[in-house]
Amino acid sequence: MKVDFTRWLPAIAKDSYRKTALSVVGVAALGGLAFGPTAVAAPITSGPHEGAVAAIDLATGKANAEKQGTPVESGLTTGSSSGKPQAGKPSRDKLIPHGVEGAQSRIPLDDAQLANAKAIVEAAKKSGVGERGAVVGVATSLQESKLYNLGHLGAYNDHDSQGLFQQRPSSGWGTPDQITDPDYSATAFFNALKNVGGWQDLPLTAAAQTVQVSAFPYAYAQWEEQAADVVQQLW
């Protein structure tokens, strides 16, 4: 049965200023399920819904670009491949100290996604997790929500998961209003990350998974390189 995913585009994502919903996005959570900050319960999520993939392609313009044969370029200029950052920017050694794991994914980013990434980076600074923590946070959000601040998606929602990190009110992450506040949700993520002993020495996917307890624990690794590019430029 063919489903019209455009009906999900309006009013499902909240902006970076905690106000009304954006009309630009129509995405569902592709990542796992964020249990509570100290939860150890087994994940119960299923695989990515086809509707989520279709909605993301539509929201980012990827579907139309591919139909027209136009290469999809990121809205963000990527970091220097030479490893030499601009003055005052963190080095690749700080951002990716253990090297990337496996094949890397990359998506185009619009203004809403970049604004949410900036909120994560600022929360990383305030919470004291530094550049590496910011990379973990951005990569986690790329996997969980593609950096969109998602409200409840109705039938497509993953349980009661919402926000940049798909955190669950029922698992103690906060109220729906709190977890759809980018600063609150990112700070909650980083506070949980700081409770992971030796997280700085863990591979990104292990650090993220310890916080998120996702049904797809290795999915975070694919976003490490793009997350590093984002953090390097927004730091």
Image (spheres, rainbow, N blue to C red):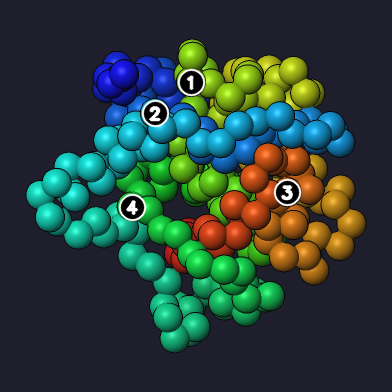
State the separation of the CA atoms marked 3 and 1. 23 Å
Q: Are marks 3 and 1 in contact (CB under 8 Å)?
A: no
Q: Are marks 3 and 4 in contact (CB under 8 Å)?
A: no
Q: Position of residue 226 (x, y in %)?
A: 47, 62
Mark before the other along the chain sequence, 2 or 4: 2
Q: Which residue is mark 2?
A: 51
Q: Under tag 2, what secondary structure?
A: helix
**What amino acid does circle 3 point to?**
Gln
Mark before the other along the chain sequence, 3 or 1: 1
Q: Residue at x 41, y 47 (%)?
A: 114
Q: Residue at x 53, y 21 (%)?
A: 157
Q: Position of residue 155 (x, y in %)?
A: 49, 14
**What amino acid does circle 4 point to?**
Pro
Location of residue 129 by image quarter: bottom right
State the separation of the CA atoms marked 4 and 1. 23 Å
State the separation of the CA atoms marked 2 and 1. 8 Å
Side (left or right) of 185 relative to 231: right
Q: Position of residue 29 (x, y in %)?
A: 51, 33
Q: Are marks 2 and 1 in contact (CB under 8 Å)?
A: yes
**What amino acid does circle 2 point to?**
Gly
**What amino acid does circle 1 point to?**
Tyr
Q: Under tag 4, what secondary structure?
A: loop
Q: Which residue is mark 1?
A: 156
Q: Position of residue 85 (x, y in %)?
A: 48, 79
The image's mark for residue 108 is 4
Mark before the other along the chain sequence, 3 or 2: 2
State the separation of the CA atoms marked 3 and 4. 24 Å
The image's mark for residue 8 is none
Mark before the other along the chain sequence, 4 or 1: 4
Mark before the other along the chain sequence, 2 or 1: 2
Q: Which residue is mark 3?
A: 209
